[in-house]
Amino acid sequence: MADRSGGSTRKPDADDEPAGMDDVNPRRSAAQLIAAVRWFALATLDEHGSPALSYVPFAAAGGAFAIVASRLAAHTANLLARRPATIILVDADARGDAYAQPRLSIQVSACPQPRGSAEADAIWSALVARHGATATILRTLPDFEAISLAPSTGRLVSGFASAHDLDASAIVDSLRTASLP
């Protein structure tokens, strides 16, 4: 169980602790997880309140999660309408108990960036640097929108009895300190 200050009430046993996660420093652990994964699951709501779930490669730009999304995808319309959204990053390569996998869930606000703006260019550049040729090709397609996902709150689970609430500044700090190619 976690206390509201970000510490845990019980230190996990060595077998509980996933490899590579630092239970002592939630910001550092979040940065490590952000750097380790290249995509997240994105949950959005449509105009009727029905959920849509998507797989989205990401990068970091301007203190936010940077994505591009096709207007053909359901989640894009939901993001462009600025409906609530949540992302979850999971360290799928971590060994051990599936219930104790490191994960970071974050409430985000979508900020569509106008094509050709400095913000959109920064998103595209970050995605090309992290994901290569496919992002370069997507940039030539007219239906792709550059979108910043600004974090508001999050919850880092780094193992059994190790959960930490993170505010927006902690998540932005983790994004900026994560070593993203």
Image (spheres, helix red, strand yellow):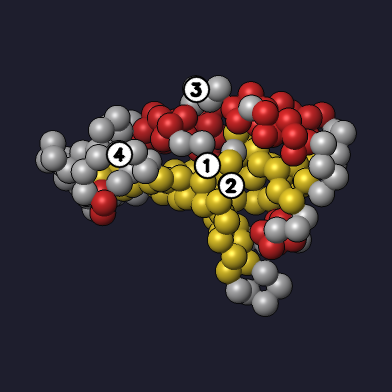
Q: Quick one: 113 or 134, which is closer to the camera?
A: 134
Residue type at tag 2: Val
Place of residue 143 in the rendered image (x, y in percent of width and height, measured from the top left): 82, 49
What residue does disc 2 label? 56
Q: Are marks 1 and 2 in contact (CB under 8 Å)?
A: yes
Secondary element under disc 2, as helix, strand or loop, is strand
Q: Quick one: 145 or 166, which is closer to the camera?
A: 145
Q: Quadrant of residue 80?
A: bottom right
What residue does disc 3 label? 179
Say whether disc 3 or disc 2 marks the residue closer to the N-terminus.
Answer: 2
Q: Quadrant of residue 164?
A: top left
What residue does disc 1 label? 39
Residue type at tag 3: Ser
Q: Are marks 3 and 2 in contact (CB under 8 Å)?
A: no
Q: Quadrant of residue 43?
A: bottom right
**For mark 2, does the 10 Å Cα neighbourhood hold few (<14), some (14 to 19), or many (20 or more) residues?**
some
The CA span between labels 4 and 1 is: 15 Å
> Which residue is pictured at 78% across the width and 46% down the height?
144
> Which residue is pictured at 77% across the width and 55% down the height?
71
